[in-house]
Every structure is written in structure tokens, then in C-alpha cells.
Amino acid sequence: MQRLAILLGLCTLGCSEYGLDNYTPVEPTPAEEEEEVLPQEEDCVESETGFDIEEVSTLQDAFGLPMVRDGLTLEVQDSFTANERTWRPVGVEVLVMLPDWYYDFYDDSNTLSVHVYDSANPTASAPFTVRRRIAKADLSFSPLRLPSNADWSAENLDQMAAWVSFDFSELTPETGFEANRYFVAVEWDEVGFPNVGYSNFELACQQNWTDYGDKHWKQNSGDDCSWPMFKIDIETRTPGEECE
């Protein structure tokens, strides 16, 4: 308290000559001018069909076996990798089939898994996997009749069929796949049901690999092989380019 009184006294003696009117505030040192931040160019991201079995073949049969895996080596178009574009699979559709006489009895208890590999064959990398329970209420089944030369389903030509979507958009990397070839496979559960539609037996066997439940992939050989009915969506990303 005594110290405060002394300070007030000093101000009384010394502050009269220098009133507040004569006070010039010290300007703060200007901050360095901030570097201008340019808006980042956005990438052009597009999605299109990379493979459609109906464009290269037709439905001929319906097949399924417990714990079997069956798949295809596929290749993306050159345009998907031009001009520094990257690509990745983001969706796979599989044609699921039930004999029409059994449709009302099916209890929605079975699952299918789809695997996507960033390699030309399933022995070279680990897969990205989506597993889905096949429930009738989630799908749009329609009746169809298989051709008379169906093999596996020869006694069940009348079928109910639906395309089932498996979403990989949260799994495959946005940075893209490494090469221009990749592998897609379907896997049945321990019951081996429901069946999956298959194309005619006229497509390349070297692109078809099968694991018959022993956890070993085998590349098929010969000139005539059946392929699962797949449709595959590919997302492409072109850096720093606006989409048209």
C-alpha cells in the first residue's frame, strides 16, 4: 500500500508535463505477410463398368458347392490407366439363382463372399473381401428358364434369379491398384448355396481359377470353360483434371 502511494505521488509530479494527449502509441511490428494459399485442384473421379459377362457370353447354368471358390483374371481397358489415371474396383455384382420350386422354402440363411485381388491370379496377393447374407427381401428376384443344355442344373431349368451387389468402395485403396490385371472370385459357405449363374462353356480357361475347398487355387486349362456371371464397376481418378 505504501509503495502504491509513492508511485501515485511520482505520477503527480512527473506526469503533468506529459499529458495523455501527447502520448503516441507504439505501432506493433507488422506480421509477415501470409503466403497466399491457392485452391487445390480437384481430381476427376468417375465410375463405369469394367466388365460385364453379358457383353461376352450368355447365361447357361447355375452352380454351387460347399466352400468352393471360383474366379476370373480380368484386365482393365488402356484408357483406365492413360494420363496418370488410377483405377480400382468398387463394386461387384453376382447373379444368384434358386430353383423356382425351392424359392418359397429358402430361409435367407446362406451367405456368399466375393474376393477382389490386386493381381492377375489369387496366389500373388491377399484379397479384399465382402461377405453378404442372401436374403430374398433385399433382392429383386425374377423367373427365368435355363437353356436345355444346362449341365449342373439340368433337372431344375426353371429358376429365380437376382443380381446381388457387393460394395468394395470402402475397402479398395483410393490410390488405385498396381497393375492393369486383377482377379475376382466368388466363394460359397459350408452349405454351398444359393447357386450362382454361369456363362456358356466357350470362354478361355487360363483366365479361370478354382479352389475346390482344399484352400489351393488351381488354374484351369483347355479351350472351353464356364465363367461366373459377374458385373464389375471400376472407379478411375485423374489427378488435377475436371470431369467433363
Image (spheres, rainbow, N blue to C red):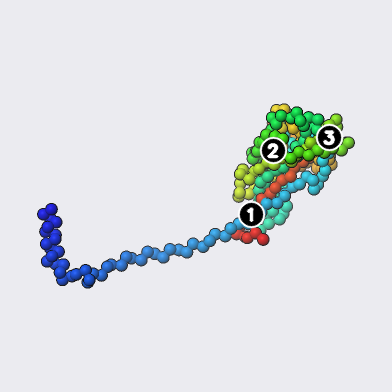
- Quick check: marks 3 and 2 in contact, CB under 8 Å? no
Mark 1 and mark 3: Cα distance apart in space: 41 Å
Dividing the picture into quarters, in which one does residue 66 lie? top right
Mark 3 and mark 2: Cα distance apart in space: 21 Å
Classed neighbour count for the residue bearing mark 1: other residues with Cα under 10 Å, few (<14), some (14–19), many (≥20): some
Is 3 on the left or on the right of 162, as rendered?
Answer: left
- Furthest-right residue in this view: 148
Tag 2 secondary structure: helix
Mark 2 and mark 1: Cα distance apart in space: 29 Å
Q: For this rendering, which residue is in front, 2 or 89? A: 2
Is 86 on the left or on the right of 27, as rendered?
Answer: right
Who comes first in sequence, dot 2 or dot 1? Answer: 1
Q: Which residue is mark 2?
A: 138
Dividing the picture into quarters, in which one does residue 126 lie? top right
Tag 3 secondary structure: strand
Residue at 60%, 50% (x, y): give it: 175
Residue type of the residue flagged with mark 3: Asp
Q: Which residue is mark 3?
A: 158
Q: Which residue is mark 1?
A: 45
Who comes first in sequence, dot 1 or dot 3? Answer: 1
Residue at 82%, 36% (x, y): give it: 61
Residue at 66%, 50% (x, y): give it: 235
In the rendered image, residue 82, in percent from the top left (x then y), is placed at: 68, 57
- Give the vertical position of 239 relative to 156 (above or below): below
